[in-house]
Image (cartoon, rainbow, N blue to C red):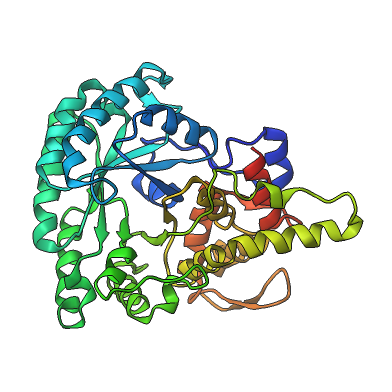
Amino acid sequence: MRHFGHIPSTTRAGLFHREPAVFTADSPARTLAVALGATLYSPATRPRLADDVRKQAARGVVSMVLCLEDSISDGEVEAGEVNLVRQFADLAAGTVTDGDTVTDVPLLFIRVREPRQITDLVDRLGDTVRLLSGFVLPKFTENRGRAFLEALTQAERNCGRRLFAMPVLESPELLHLETRAETLAGIASITDKYRDRVLALRLGVTDFCSAYGLRRSPDMTAYDVKIVANVIADVVNVLGRSDGTGFTVTGPVWEYFRPGERMFKPQLRRSPFLEGRAEDLRTALIQHDLDGLLREIELDRANGLLGKTCIHPTHVVPVHALSVVSHEEWSDAQDILRPEQGGGGVLRSAYTNKMNEVKPHRAWAERTLLRAEVFGVANEDVGFVDLLTAGLAG
């Protein structure tokens, strides 16, 4: 897998100063946590789920969650489990492998409801478990999470494969102020105990809003809902630190989309009547159509989040386009991390528009270069619109 791997190599060469690196489901956890990008959710009951997975992989999706929880009704769970086993067999039948490494499907995770489902599904999947990267654990707290993580450990023993957990932080105990600090401390304790198995932490903002009967409009980001913004800040404060104790925390879901899977395509066509204004018009139309999502992605990164939960395929390319490291960011990070700067100090940036402080900016630089490894570094003259256009056209 590689980000933007679905577009022609000649196009990639024109976009990137350094192209995104290839990775597999067997890559180091630190790499995979960043590489998740836009994680696309799909109900586990979809009758042509295997075809959906292949189609989305061909369009640039590198991580998917097949959901047995909130996206399906209580009465559909058993049928969803049966369908998952059947669809994994379908996927496995048409999958290219290099040794034991799967090469043509995204990172696949199953969102379960109860711990017992983890061991049960791994047993039922049989050999096709090689396509599975792990499980998404809902409404995660210390007490509830322990049983899930114990089940995951047992499932690993049963199948002999590495399986990751992605806990979802969405419980009322985390939202409510009087229980938040204790809940966060408990989550920190249990995730640290199982650190090698926790790939990333996901935020369930829809559940947070539900607890107060709220729903943000398409003109608002999660950060405009102060109750939600406060929880995100506290989660990052406790669980997203860059001192070696933290985890990758992913951005919340964006709920809005237009009908159809290629909703931005009409806005990307150049008008033959506008000549030099065509690029400006194209940019304006894209930004208008995506405004809320784009602002939220930018605020995610500013607040320490990386990647995003997505419930519609049209959200994937914008998330990935905004995850590419700009040439300016890469240049600054490179300068900050040069060996000769180990003693600290202040440097004028190569772009001569800012000062880079070596010690305070070191953690940012390390994080930026890891993102550059999996999402690439754009050429100096390449911006978001270029990346979005190429990603959609691919």
Q: Residue at x 59, y 61 (%)?
A: 290
Residue 6 image-quadrant placement: top right
The percent coordinates of residue 387 (x first, y second) are: 66, 50
Q: Please state the total of marks drawn on the protein image.
A: 0
* Left-right relation of 271 to 378: right
Of the pair 345 and 104, the residue shown nearer to us: 104
Q: Residue at x 53, y 55 (%)?
A: 319
Q: Is residue 70 above or below residue 2?
A: below
Of the pair 254 and 152, the residue shown nearer to us: 254
* Left-right relation of 297 to 29: right
Name, please, the residue furthest toward the top: 93
Q: Residue at x 63, y 44 (%)?
A: 392
Residue 146 visible (yes or no): yes
Quadrant in the picture for the C terminus:
top right
* Left-right relation of 130 to 177: right
Residue 245 visible (yes or no): no
Q: Is residue 106 above or below residue 88?
A: below
The percent coordinates of residue 211 (x first, y second) are: 24, 72
The percent coordinates of residue 140 (x first, y second) are: 19, 59
* Left-right relation of 196 to 247: left
The percent coordinates of residue 57 (x first, y second) are: 48, 34
Of the pair 272 and 109, the residue shown nearer to us: 272
Q: Residue at x 53, y 39 (%)?
A: 60
